[in-house]
Image: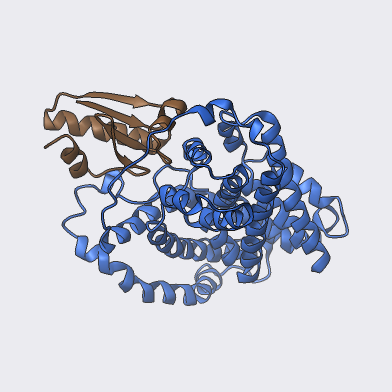
Amino acid sequence: MSECCANKGEPSLVTIGSNKRNSKTRLWLPLLLIPVFVLLYIYLERGTDYLVYSLLSMDRNSHLTEAVRFFIFEVPKVLLLLTAIVFVVGIIRSYFSPEKTRRALEGKPLFLGNIMASALGIVTPFCSCSAIPLFIGFVESGIPLGVTFSFLIAAPMINEVALVLLFGLFGWKTAFLYASTGLLIAISAGWVIGKLKLERFVEAWVYEIKAAELKIAESETPFSERIEAGYTAVADIVSKVWIYIAIGIAVGAGVHGYVPENFMASLMGKSAWWSVPLAVLIGVPLYSNAAGIIPIVQALLEKGASLGTSLAFMMSVIGLSFPEMIILKKVIKLPLILIFIGVVASGIMVVGFLFNLIY
Amino acid sequence: MEIKVLGPGCSNCQKVEKLVRETVSEAGVAADIEKVSDIMRIAKYGVLSTPAVVVDGEVKSVGKIPKKEEILAWIGK
């Protein structure tokens, strides 16, 4: 879901110039910060309790206290996790690029191609504003349409911000479920689209463009530059999403403290079978980032919403975005866009029903 | 010299255009700088990610904000 064009690589404009002087420090700082992060993370709950109950001497049993405590504890916790993970992911992503991914996918048969494209979709730096050049580049070099779609589904759906929030607020099991079922949806939806032979719905000019062969000398990237990529990712992503996280958790805290237990059971509970398709129906046109939506869904889950319905809702909000459809409309015709939405939405619904059945 | 900045109009593409313009004028090089936002034209260069910088028909960088030193090297400074 990275909303930018450059997630990898060089320092942003602001930091240019000031880098050289303290580059040594910047290399070692992350290592030095690890124990600080761990300690902060461990003592955060105790610190929050001390602040809320002792310093602010708030009443232990009031809804307001509960909401305030939730907010003061969760926001720094999630931001700590996010900063650490985004930094590491930034370094990992510097090893990948759309060009390398294309080379890896060229000549791969449908099913294997779908698996690889989905997996690579998670780690390849990608933003929706590059979706068109990427789509054209993939299709032109002979990568099947279905494989290309696997990439385009996995890339926004499984992203580090969503995973950090799921891990921090729901726990590792839900984060793992989200990532693995998201991967399965990307693989199978892409495979289905490939089997349907929909090439005729791609605008003809896409096949006619004779794109120049891209030749850029790939010089060895020193590790210090990859560390810089980590810093850039933190500066880019954390600065953009922290506000949504804070707002999302604030709303979540309100729900947490004030909405009665089981309030959501009739609406988003598992006894209401229609809740899954309804969640998807609402989720697809709703365009919000993971950072804002996940904390709210977490709060709803506590009030009786079921896991399957919640997962389906989050996936359809994060995975299928309206702006991306509009961008893709330039290269593919409406029927293919509708089939794309339909196939992915069906996959999400299957996941929703499945988890409502199991849990 | 002809420099093209390829990008459909996201914030990083604008940053690159600004950086290229600044660097070129600081270096005192006479160059024709154009921002290309037409998808078809961008695709023709074979780039998969934007922003990209093309100097005299040669793609120099893709999917990142180049460093000032890199731009200076491309324009022969």
Find residue A331 and report its image quarter: top right
- The residue drawn where x is 52% and y is 50% is A107
Is A335 left or right of A149, judged from the image as shown? Answer: right
- The residue drawn where x is 37% and y is 56% is A94
Q: What shade does chain A have? A: blue
Is A9 left or right of A184, judged from the image as shown? Answer: left
Camera-side residue: A112 or A354? A112
Q: Could you tell me residue A136's position as x and y percent?
A: 50, 36
Camera-side residue: A307 or A325? A325
Q: Could you tell me residue A145's position as x and y percent?
A: 60, 42
Q: Could you tell me residue A41's position as x and y percent?
A: 47, 73
Q: What shade does chain B have? A: brown
Tag count in the figure?
A: 0
- The residue drawn where x is 71% and y is 35% is A338
Q: Is residue B11 above or below residue A194?
A: above
Residue A101 in sight from this viewpoint: yes
Is A351 left or right of A158, judged from the image as shown? Answer: right
Q: Quadrant of the C terminus of chain A?
A: bottom right
Q: Could you tell me residue A108's position as x and y percent?
A: 55, 53
Q: Is residue A262 above or below residue A218?
A: below
Q: Is residue A231 above or below residue A205?
A: below
- The residue drawn where x is 51% and y is 63% is A78
Residue A261 in sight from this viewpoint: no
